[in-house]
Image (cartoon, coloured by chain):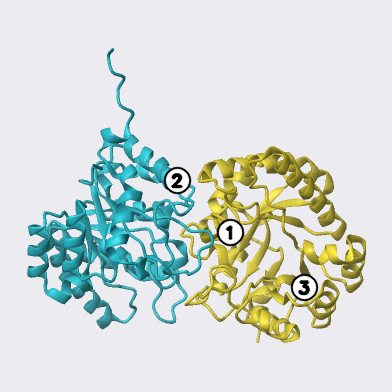
Chain colours: A cyan, B yellow
Amino acid sequence: MPDLSRFAMNQITTRNWTLAEAVDGFARQGVGGIGVWVDYVDAVGVAVAARMIRDAGLFVPSLCTSAWVNLSEPAAFAAALEENRRRIAMAAALGARCLVVVPGGLATGEHDLAAARRRVEDALAALLPDARAAGVALGLEPLHPMYAADRSCLNSFAQCLALAERLGPGVGIVADLYHCWWDPDFTTGLRRAGAANILSFHLCDWLVPTRDVYQDRGMVGDGVIDVAGYRKVLDSIGYDGPFELEIFSKLDWWRRDCEETTRIGIARCAPFVGLREVMQAAPAQAS
Amino acid sequence: MPDLSRFAMNQITTRNWTLAEAVDGFARQGVGGIGVWVDYVDAVGVAVAARMIRDAGLFVPSLCTSAWVNLSEPAAFAAALEENRRRIAMAAALGARCLVVVPGGLATGEHDLAAARRRVEDALAALLPDARAAGVALGLEPLHPMYAADRSCLNSFAQCLALAERLGPGVGIVADLYHCWWDPDFTTGLRRAGAANILSFHLCDWLVPTRDVYQDRGMVGDGVIDVAGYRKVLDSIGYDGPFELEIFSKLDWWRRDCEETTRIGIARCAPFVGLREVMQAAPAQAS
């Protein structure tokens, strides 16, 4: 039996399942945790969602995601902060380790990416006291540069790490292979961050060719990413946090039966998500 | 009349034109130069191509591109080096300022991006004596991270600048807004590189949404990139090299009449490609 105690399915991977179906489906197949999305929680209410997850014995590595704060209009910006405070409270109620920060890219009509990034930093500084009070970390997730305009203006590991350092305690990194695998400084960044500052580590694969800019991520093993190599880096820095399988796939996995996606996801990830000792060679037996 | 003396059309922007048609079409509309692709030169032979371009009075900022060297098999790797030597000679014959290096991503079946990058560095070190002897610079072009697997493993400005510094004289950077606009270190990188190390500066725009991973680049002005802001950065470092309009657009510009694409390209780029003085405010007149 594979050790899945650190392994979570991010529920977007089985997008067609409700939260109740995902909790049940993941737990039945022995998955340790569930990465949760706000919309699915809102559909049943946070109290019901929290009880459901607790009763199934699943841990929650992350709540996805923060509301966008890429808004230059002051009233809209203020409303976005309020919505994010609600999500911080939701993450706390769910026992989530962090709220994943996906702050949006440019505001409508905006061309100044540096200004968008400064606005995001201001927003996070404003939210940080709430996050600290709630015991929920803000998880900065470097998103692939191809999403800089319309998803997130946080686009490299080094950028997020520098931002986390400026903001201080209560802020960490959510590292995702899909978004970071290309980065010449990814391994260096993981080492510089240190295990304590990596809140969750997302597994996925990069398909060749990639047929859609937004929703054609690959199942672990179907693409070109050296997952085993990154697991070694994580072990070398003593990372003992969660692994999450997160796949956006309108052309493949979202069309399949969620039970099957879960089963195959477990099989593909199992070699990479066990406890540290499991990954290392067994010691030679005395004869 | 706009000053187009530093402005080149990269011929891929008018993909349906032969080299002869592009040379004629660009020159008739007053464009200063032409970025040339190897296939179009091969179609007429390098001697004919060189005479054609010279007779039209066009400068050649770059020859696109190097042959891929992402080959782990020794004989194939050696053959790729030979092909690149041919392209260096071609660039020299055309009077091109540089050969644009697009070295490929991972080899078939390969998962080790760091190994691919080391192989590229070795290949460039092997080619550099030929490039120096021919008086052709090797132009390292950071390609957007979404091409890391299957186009180029050179994916950030800082990575290319560090590589250029390791390789030494005869190597520079080809900077392209499409590939670099998202990079938090792009402006810093341009300043660190200095004007002398920027061989050509490509203009383009990033569309929202981007409908195709490979061939949906936007005409200058149709996307979100702050072209004027980058022109200011270039002026601040004393860049006086070429600007090239390079658009891959199977959904739009490649379907249009090439004459029209050239005309619109000139109109859109003219505000950003003039001599330095043209960009600055006119001095106050003594009354």
Would you say B97 lies left or right of A255 here?
right
Hey, what amino acid is under mark 1? Answer: Leu
Real-space CA distance between mark 3 and mark 2, rounded to the nearest whole angstrom? 47 Å
Q: Which mark is residue B5?
A: 3
| B46 up-or-down from B153: above or below | below
| A239 up-or-down from B148: above or below | above
Does residue B7 appear in this view?
no
Residue B73: x and y in percent read 66, 40
Counting other residues with Cα less than 10 Å from the Cα at mark 2, is it few (<14), some (14-19), or many (20 or more)? Answer: some
Residue B274: x and y in percent read 70, 74
Hey, what amino acid is under mark 2? Answer: Asp
Task: Identify which residue is drawn at 92% across, 61% down.
Answer: B47
Q: Which chain's residue wears label 1?
A: B
* Nearest to viewer (mark 2 / mark 1): 2
Mark 2, residue position? A226
Real-space CA distance between mark 1 and mark 3, rounded to the nearest whole angstrom? 26 Å
Residue at mark 1 shares a chain with residue at mark 3? yes
Mark 1, residue position? B143
Hey, what amino acid is under mark 3? Answer: Ser
Would you say A139 lies left or right of A203 here?
left
Task: Identify which residue is drawn at 29% across, 69% down.
Answer: A15
Marks 1 and 3 in Cβ contact (< 8 Å): no
Looking at the rendered structure, the secondary structure element under dot 3 is loop
